[in-house]
């Protein structure tokens, strides 16, 4: 007769098999949903019309034209991406309120492919398009209906006065900045600029 721990004793093997057979095998992991094609989704949003003569893509191009030369500074109160979204809201507000008679902004001109090969230009372009898409899809307008844009070289918050407008001007709605301006010009004659939006006339 064999003793329990003799070389021929297989009871321990039987116990091991029995124990393993009682363990529950975990179910296989659920398959991951197919990834969303962000490029295709973005392009479909950009084709939506804000007004009869202005698409979301047009808004993005105008935002790009207005803000291409701007970039963040350590003291910026918010990233330039956030300021671009406010500019997009402002452009849409003007179009919805005034139609083709909306306040003037940079025309929606597509940059040439060669220009978009520049990483800084491409980043500004992509940021502007994202700003337009997010402004269009957003249920909240941080500019509270602003339709005017100005880029002062100081953090001035006084009313903006313009030719043909009311004597008292229009009040500021948002102020973002300061930002580095890589292309000083007649409109923004400084390497430092803010991005301000202003209300419609009452």
Image (cartoon, rainbow, N blue to C red):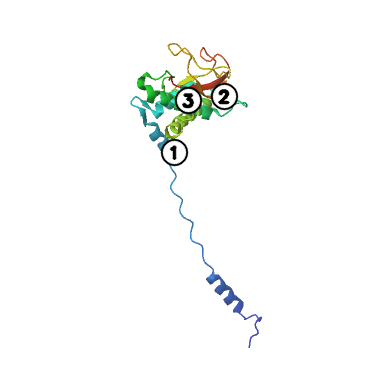
Task: State the SS at label 3.
Answer: helix
Task: State the SS at label 2.
Answer: strand
Task: State the SS at label 1.
Answer: helix
Quarter of the rendering occupied by the N terminus: bottom right
State whether residue 113 appears in this view. no
Position of residue 95 measured from the top left corner of the image (x, y, whole percent): 39, 24
Q: Circles 3 and 1: CB distance less than 8 Å?
A: no
Specify the farthest residue to the bottom: 1
Quarter of the rendering occupied by the C terminus: top left
Image quadrant in which you'd find residue 113:
top left
Label 1 sits on residue:
38
Neighbor class of circle 2 (other Cα within 10 Å; few <14, some 14-19, many 20+) is many
Label 2 sits on residue:
177
Q: Circles 3 and 2: CB distance less than 8 Å?
A: no
Eyeballing the image, is 99 above or below 28? above
Instruction: Kindly report the distance in space between the C-alpha atoms of the residues bearing marks 1 and 2.
Output: 30 Å
Which mark sits nearer the N-terminus, 1 or 2? 1
Position of residue 166 measured from the top left corner of the image (x, y, whole percent): 45, 14
Neighbor class of circle 3 (other Cα within 10 Å; few <14, some 14-19, many 20+) is many
Which mark sits nearer the N-terminus, 3 or 1? 1
Neighbor class of circle 1 (other Cα within 10 Å; few <14, some 14-19, many 20+) is few
Numbered mark located on residue 87 in the image: 3
Residue for point 43% across, 24% down: 91
Of the pair 142 and 194, the residue shown nearer to us: 142
Instruction: Kindly report the distance in space between the C-alpha atoms of the residues bearing marks 3 and 2.
Output: 13 Å
State whether residue 171 appears in this view. yes
Instruction: Kindly report the distance in space between the C-alpha atoms of the residues bearing marks 3 and 1.
Output: 23 Å
Say whether residue 101 is left or right of residue 78: left
């Amino acid at each position: 007769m064999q003793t329990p721990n003799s070389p021929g004793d297989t009871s321990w093997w039987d116990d091991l098999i029995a124990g393993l057979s009682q363990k529950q095998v975990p179910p296989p992991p659920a398959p991951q949903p197919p990834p969303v094609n962000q490029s295709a989704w973005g392009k479909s949003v950009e084709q939506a019309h804000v007004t009869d003569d202005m698409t979301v893509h047009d808004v993005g191009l105008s935002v790009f034209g207005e803000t291409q030369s701007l970039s963040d500074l350590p003291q910026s109160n918010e990233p330039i991406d956030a300021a671009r979204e406010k500019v997009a809201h402002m452009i849409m507000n003007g179009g919805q309120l005034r139609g083709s008679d909306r306040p003037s902004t940079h025309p929606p001109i597509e940059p040439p492919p060669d220009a978009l090969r520049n990483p800084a230009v491409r980043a500004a372009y992509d940021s502007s398009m994202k700003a337009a898409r997010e402004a269009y899809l957003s249920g909240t307008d941080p500019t509270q209906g602003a339709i005017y844009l100005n880029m002062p070289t100081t953090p001035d918050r006084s009313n903006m006065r313009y030719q043909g407008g009311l004597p008292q001007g229009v009040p500021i709605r948002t102020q973002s900045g300061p930002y580095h301006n890589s292309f000083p010009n007649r409109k923004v004659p400084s390497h430092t600029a803010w991005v301000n939006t202003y209300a419609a006339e009452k």
